[in-house]
Amino acid sequence: MQPRTNGRSILVVDHPALQDRLAQLRDRNTPTRSFRVLLEHVGALLAYEATRSLPTREVDVETPLLSMKAARIAQPPVIAPILRAGLGLVPGFLQIVEDAVVAHLGFYRDPQTLQAVPYYANIPARLDGRRVFVLDPMLATGASGIAALRLLATHGASEVTFVSVIAAPEGIAAIQAAFPDVRIVVGAVDAELNEHGYIVPGLGDAGDRLFGSLTSLPTFVAPRSL
Ligand code: URA
């Protein structure tokens, strides 16, 4: 099966190896320890497709038999997992792009404005000319995704790919409206969001299933500004 693309901005990776793992991730009976491993595999399979167009540079290599020209990845990309569930895609991504720089992005939902507000951001100072991959297993409303893309844009990021395991049509539309140049790579596009903002049929709360926590309500102290 070939990856399906809609113009240049969205790629649905329908490789059987990925779809097989996705079916297991969706299964409510899959335990945390298996969920973590499956998400790592899916991260690698998504990374394999998402990084296909990374620029390469020519290098000279001496094989045991001859000298030859070969290709290396020109510049390590930046991967930016959105906390916390995005962390589950990092190990698989790093299998494919071992030298990637890992940025971290955390957001909370302001109870008054319902906006995604950054509470933690560790990003290289400048991202101009760098390939950046935002990692979030569930592209639901797109609110934290858009907040992440805004934050990365303030650091000069312009070549950004958004990588998710499952996306809702609402989230894809929101990202495409706010950032038409951002490429989206996903394992599946599900039917819709429910009234609680969960993707259906989806796989439930990716962070809770990855970390074995019982609730998705985080306890933290919000900083005044970032
Ligand atoms: N985040 C999740 O973990 N799951 C959803 O279905 C939506 C957002």
Image (spheres, rainbow, N blue to C red):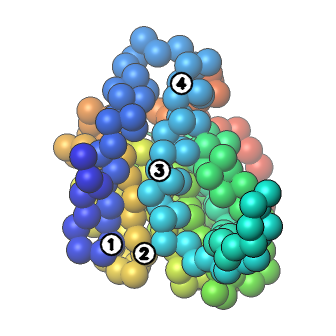
Of the image marks 2 and 3, the number of the one nearer the N terminus: 3
Q: What residue do we see at 39% from left, 64% from top?
A: 184
Alpha carbon distance from label 4 to label 3: 16 Å
| Quarter of the rendering containing residue 34 | top right
Above-or-below relation of 70 to 137: below
From the viewer's side, name the closer residue of 167 and 15: 15
Of the image marks 4 and 2, the number of the one nearer the N terminus: 4
Q: What residue do we see at 60% from left, 82% from top?
A: 157
Of the image marks 4 and 1, the number of the one nearer the N terminus: 1
| Quarter of the rendering containing residue 142 | bottom left
Name the residue that disc number 4 marks: 35
Of the image marks 1 and 2, the number of the one nearer the N terminus: 1
Q: Secondary structure at mark 4?
A: helix
Q: What residue do we see at 33% from left, 43% from top?
A: 15
Circle 2 Cα neighbour tier, 10 Å, few/some/many (<14 / 14–19 / ≥20): many
Please state which of the two labelled residues, at mark 4 or mark 3, is closer to the viewer.
3
Alpha carbon distance from label 3 to label 1: 15 Å
Is ligand 1 within 8 Å of the beta carbon of the residue shown at mark 2? Answer: no
Is ligand 1 within 8 Å of the beta carbon of the residue shown at mark 1? Answer: no
Name the residue that disc number 1 marks: 9
Residues at discs 1 and 2 in contact (Cβ within 8 Å): yes
Circle 1 Cα neighbour tier, 10 Å, few/some/many (<14 / 14–19 / ≥20): some
Q: Is residue 3 visible?
A: yes
| Quadrant of ligand 1 in image | top left
**Position in image of residue 109 (x %, y %):** 55, 54
Q: Secondary structure at mark 2?
A: loop
